[in-house]
Structure formats: structure tokens, C-alpha cells
Image: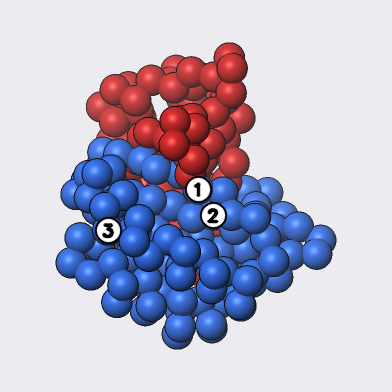
Chain colours: A red, B blue
Amino acid sequence: MIKVSVLYPNGPESRFDIDYYLRSHMPMVQRRLGAPLQRMAVEYGLGGGAPGAPPPFLAMGHLYFASVEAFQSAFGPHAEAVMADVANYTNTKPVIQISEVKL
Amino acid sequence: MIKVSVLYPNGPESRFDIDYYLRSHMPMVQRRLGAPLQRMAVEYGLGGGAPGAPPPFLAMGHLYFASVEAFQSAFGPHAEAVMADVANYTNTKPVIQISEVKL
């Protein structure tokens, strides 16, 4: 199984609307991608490693698929619509990571 | 529930021994932290957002707890032993994020 992680970096001017993300963006992604999207996860940043440190990322969203190919074929046709919605909840430039789930 | 993510950044000189991490480090963490550690997850970086791009992180490890307090009281007594093992599998300086699990 592979995991596509979308990490939204923290910064002085960064904003992230977690309510819009949970209520509108992620349900839209789920609807559009359908069954190949096996699982989703969302986390909201609380802090960093040192006491009182800010979180490196304001939020993270994760999408699980059987394979990289399953992700690409599910996401490709909807990439434009999904990307067009990003400005509605953040002004950050997300970091994207594709990983193999080992545990 | 909260999630403690440990992200190991990629870089030209970076190395990460995923076998040691899975076979030795994470089982040691699980043994030491015990029941307050509700779940673990490990991912190995495959790529970035653009086709052919390297993964921003070589690997990620995630630990789930009921609360920040549960994490701190479980991890505190074992922090030194856990940190001392890091050099056995990586030369990177991990990014640590504490998040609230929203979905």
C-alpha cells in the first residue's frame, strides 16, 4: 500500500482553514477519487519537538492507495479540480510525499 | 487522539536504514512505551509530487497516544535511550510534529 501525504508548512503568513478542509475539500476528494482511495487521514498541527515550539506543519492530509499506479489513474482526471480548490483553505505551498506503507 | 510524527529529511548525504528501524528501533520504542502507545505507523519515501522527484523525507515514523500528556509521561523516562539509538539508523536530523488526529 502507498500513502500520498500532503504537508502544509507553517510560517509567519501561513493560514489553513481546517473546517473547510474537513467539511468540503476532503469529502470532495473522496467523492471524485472513489474506491481506489482506500483510506484518508487528516491531522492538525499542535506543536513541534521542543516544548512550546510551533508545529512545522499547519496540517497534513494523507491518501492511501494500493499502488502508485492506482493513485495516478484515480487522481489524474481530477487533479485540476482538486488543485483549484486548494486556495479556498490555504495560502501555503504544500510539500507532497509518496511513501510505501511499511507498518 | 494525538500523533507524534518523526520525519527524516532527504538530502545528498542522508542515509536511513529502514531494516534496522523496522526490526530494532520501533520494536524497542513499543516495548519501552507500552500501553499508552496506542498505534505505530512507518512509511518509506518513494517520491515527491512531481514525476521523478525525490521524496522530501527518507522515512516517517508515527506514534499515536490519547493525549499530549499521555505521550509526555510515557516517553519522558525513555527519551534518552530512544534518542541514543537514532545514530544507529540515520545521520539526518529529524523534524518532529505533534498533531491532533482529526480524521
Q: Position of residue A69 (x, y in %)?
A: 52, 65
Q: Residue at position x 53%, y 73% from top?
A: B85
**Residue depth check, mark 1 versus mark 3: number of the one nearer the observer:** 3
Give the crowd class for mark 2: few <14, some 14-19, many >=20 residues within 10 Å. Answer: many
Q: Quadrant of the C terminus of chain A?
A: bottom left
Q: Position of residue B32 (x, y in %)?
A: 31, 72
Q: Which residue is mark 3?
A: B74
Q: Circle 2 sits in a helix, a strand or a loop, which is it?
A: strand
Check if mark 1's residue and mark 2's residue have beta carbons within 8 Å: yes
Q: Circle 3 sits in a helix, a strand or a loop, which is it?
A: helix
Residue type, label 2: Leu
Closer to the camera in the image, A1 or B40 = B40
Does label 1 or label 3 sit earlier along the sequence?
3
Q: Position of residue A47 (x, y in %)?
A: 42, 35
Give the crowd class for mark 3: few <14, some 14-19, many >=20 residues within 10 Å. Answer: some
Q: Which residue is mark 1?
A: B96
Q: Compared with residue A67, is residue A41 higher up or lower down, i.e. above or below?
A: above
Question: Label 3 marks which chain's residue?
Answer: B
Does label 1 or label 2 sit earlier along the sequence?
2
Closer to the camera in the image, B34 or A57 = B34
Q: Are marks 3 and 2 on the same chain?
A: yes
Mark pair 1, 2: CA separation: 6 Å
Q: Are marks 1 and 2 on the same chain?
A: yes
Closer to the camera in the image, A67 or B87 = B87
Q: Which residue is mark 2?
A: B7
Query: Is residue B79 in view from this perspective?
Result: yes
Q: Is residue B40 left or right of residue B66?
A: right
